[in-house]
Image (tube, rainbow, N blue to C red):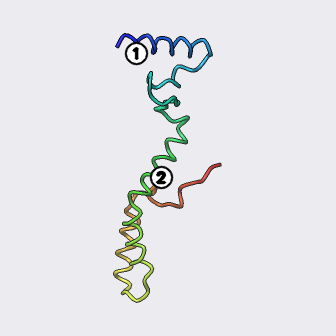
Amino acid sequence: MAAQRIACSGLSALGSSVFAPQQALRSCWGVLEQARGYYVNWRMLRDVKRRQMAFDYADERLRINALRKNTILPKELQEVADKEISALPRDSCPVRIRNRF
């Protein structure tokens, strides 16, 4: 146990002497990677929320759109499906997702 503490303190001293960022060291013996828990700005957060909502509502939107666009079904049923699709959240539509490179 004492050897592990010495090794950990040696690793942290080595990291500080090489100017490694503190968030890069996740644990003493774990994988060295950057630990991020936030989004860069509000645009990225909005994009993540839109992608998640589009994923959540994808099956429901597919089924309702199939009813809407089916020309064999009566117009009343197509209108009901149209009202259902308009009642879904706007961000659930995959068209609102913008691929940014």
Q: Quadrant of residue 8?
A: top left
- Quadrant in which the N terminus appears: top left
- Tags 1 and 2 touching, CB below 8 Å: no
Front tag of 1 and 2 = 1
Q: Residues within 10 Å of mark 1 (few under 14, many from 20)?
A: few
Residue for point 46% across, 32% down? 37
Q: Quadrant of residue 5?
A: top left
Q: Quadrant of residue 59?
A: bottom left
Residue for point 41% across, 70% down? 62
Badge 1 marks a residue whose secondary structure is helix
Q: Residue furthest front?
A: 3
Q: Position of residue 92 (x, y in %)?
A: 44, 58
Q: Distance between the Cα atoms at labels 1 and 2?
A: 43 Å
Q: Which residue is mark 2?
A: 51
In the image, residue 22 above or below residue 61: above
In the image, residue 34 above or below residue 20: below
Q: Residue furthest bottom?
A: 72
Q: Position of residue 50 (x, y in %)?
A: 47, 51
The disc label shown at residue 77, or none: none
Badge 2 marks a residue whose secondary structure is helix
Q: Which residue is mark 1?
A: 4
Q: Position of residue 79 (x, y in %)?
A: 38, 77
Residue for point 45% across, 47% down? 49
In the image, residue 53 above or below residue 10: below
**Amino acid on which the number 1 mark rests in the picture:** Gln
Q: Nearer the viewer, residue 8 or 100?
A: 8
In the image, residue 60 above or below residue 26: below
**Amino acid on which the number 2 mark rests in the picture:** Arg
Q: Position of residue 43 (x, y in %)?
A: 55, 42
Q: Nearer the viewer, residue 37 or 74?
A: 37
